[in-house]
Image (cartoon, rainbow, N blue to C red):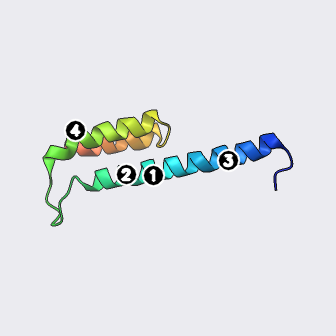
């Protein structure tokens, strides 16, 4: 258990950031899966939106650069 105010504040900040990052990762995974419809057919209208979401998640520090680059490459190769 935290003994002083700065430790307690750090715990509160970490909990808030954890929830924010978890929500961002969940929405990112949802948008990555939105490239395919229910029957695993490719839906190309969502490509630019998914790439935008990847860039946003990277700029917010939620995902790493390699994760972003790998997925952007995979999406851009889809036809």
Dot 2 and dot 3 residues touching (CB under 8 Å)? no
Where on the picture, by quarter, is residue 4?
top right
Instruction: Identify the residue position indicated by label 3 in the image.
Output: 12
Q: Residue 10 got which mark?
A: none
Q: Tell me which numbered mark, 4 or 2, is placed earlier along the sequence.
A: 2
State which mark lies toward you, 4 or 3.
3
Residue at 22%, 38% in the rendered image: 48
User: Could you classify mark 3 by the number of other residues whose Cα lies within 10 Å: few (under 14), some (14-19), or many (20 or more)?
Assistant: few
Q: Tell me which numbered mark, 2 or 3, is placed earlier along the sequence.
A: 3
Q: Nearer the viewer, residue 48 or 16?
A: 16
Q: Residue 48 got which mark?
A: 4
Q: For the residue labelled by badge 1, is the local secondary structure a helix, a strand or a loop?
A: helix
State which mark lies toward you, 4 or 1.
1
User: Could you classify mark 4 by the number of other residues whose Cα lies within 10 Å: few (under 14), some (14-19), or many (20 or more)?
Assistant: few
Q: For the residue labelled by badge 2, is the local secondary structure a helix, a strand or a loop?
A: helix
State which mark lies toward you, 4 or 2.
2
Dot 2 and dot 1 residues touching (CB under 8 Å)? yes
Query: Where residue 3 sits in the image (x, y, percent)?
Result: 86, 49
Mark 4 and mark 2: span between their CA atoms? 15 Å
Instruction: Identify the residue position indicated by label 2 in the image.
Output: 27
Residue at 43%, 40% in the rendered image: 66
Mark 1 and mark 3: span between their CA atoms? 17 Å
Residue 76 visible, this angle: no
Mark 4 and mark 1: span between their CA atoms? 21 Å
Where on the picture, by quarter, is residue 38?
bottom left
State which mark lies toward you, 2 or 3.
3
């Amino acid at each position: 258990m935290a003994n002083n105010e700065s430790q307690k504040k750090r715990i509160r900040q970490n909990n808030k950031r954890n929830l924010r990052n978890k929500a961002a990762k969940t929405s990112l995974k949802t948008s990555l899966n939105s490239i395919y419809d229910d029957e695993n057919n490719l839906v190309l209208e969502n490509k630019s939106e998914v790439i935008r979401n990847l860039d946003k998640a990277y700029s917010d520090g939620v995902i790493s650069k390699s994760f972003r680059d790998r997925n952007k490459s995979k999406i851009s190769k889809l036809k």
